Amino acid sequence: MKTVLITGASSGIGRATAMLLAKSGYNLILTGRRKEALDELKSQLLSNTKINIQILAFDVRYNEEVEKALAQIENKQIDVLINNAGLAKGFSEIHEGSLSHWEQMIDTNIKGLLYVSRIVTGWMVNQRSGQVINICSVAGKQPYPNGNVYCATKHAVDALTHTMRIDLHKYNIRVGQVSPGHVEETEFSLVRFDGDVDKSKIYEDYQPLKSSDVAEIIAFMIERPSHVNIQDIDVFGSQQASATIINRSGR
Ligand code: NDP
Ligand code: 8X3
């Protein structure tokens, strides 16, 4: 069975993807900064399945940490890399943005994705097979008010998906991305608003996607036959028509 490495598996889309792939018998390498959350997820998954699960707790923003953590993967064989770790911090006009928010988003969403990808795609090139799935966003396609730096980081992910595809297709490596609109059952909004529960309630008056909806799309991409590469899937909840146009008339 394939081995899948998921970054940011401690909550939200990454966690939902781990739960779904575990049910199908994939072996998993689950990463994130919060070791306790990853350990708890591992115990939960192992109570129902007989897969192999390795937990690697590290911060994708620091290349030394990434190198040290990934060096613990014994056979250097990853079939699927899901670059999911990411976040938005803040929601301000450009002149009022916080430098530390900007740095955290750039370091996580762009540089972290690059640090992990450089190592894992190197292994995939050696084995002449593999698949990379990046979690982009509607923010990577449509700039929206107060989204400035988060949108810029996701536009970078979009560019990287396309350029990684160009670089890696000749080594039998598939590369694609999922670009969702709003997704609930995640900590995304709470993280964006620095733990402010009231501000984070942006989904109450309509039904957005659920983390499990995105997980199902990721599983679909993995399960296509090897001659099929899904490049990008744009997906929204039915009540969301664009980054800013949402039918908030109730669920
Ligand atoms: P969550 O906040 O629930 O999950 C984010 C994950 O990223 C967590 O597991 C977190 O783990 C991990 N992460 C964040 N920073 C780091 C870091 N420096 N090093 C390692 N891991 C890190 O939100 P989502 O599930 O929504 O987010 C997953 C991805 O989906 C992100 O890339 C996000 O941009 C994207 N996305 C989200 C949408 C939404 O509406 N929710 C819509 C479109 C895209 P830990 O804190 O343990 O490090
Ligand atoms: C998360 C979706 O619209 O908040 O990437 O940017 S959005």
Image (spheres, grey):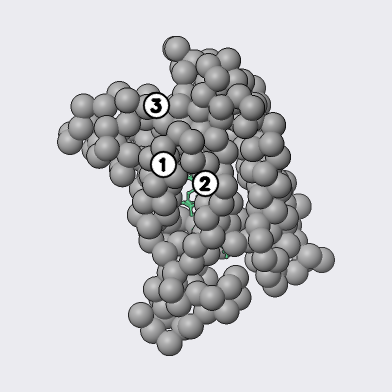
Residue at the far left in the pictured view: 48
Specify the label residue 189 is tagged with.
none
Residue 35's image quarter? top left
Specify the label residue 230 is tagged with.
2
Mark 3 vs mark 2: which is more N-terminal? 3
Q: Inspect this view and state whether residue 89 appears.
A: no
Decide: is 132 above or below 214.
above
* Mark 1 residue's CB less than 8 Å from ligand 1: no
For badge 2, the amino acid type reads Ile
Q: Label 1: how many residues lie within 10 Å, few (<14), some (14-19) or many (20+)?
A: few
Residue carrying label 3: 3
Decide: is 66 above or below 181.
above
For badge 1, the amino acid type reads Arg
> Disc 1 vs disc 2: Cβ atoms closer than 8 Å?
yes
> Disc 1 vs disc 3: Cβ atoms closer than 8 Å?
no
Q: Position of residue 141 (x, y in %)?
A: 66, 61
For badge 3, the amino acid type reads Thr
Of helix, strand and loop, which one carries label 2? Answer: loop
Q: Residue at x 65, y 57 (%)?
A: 140
Specify the label residue 224 is tagged with.
1
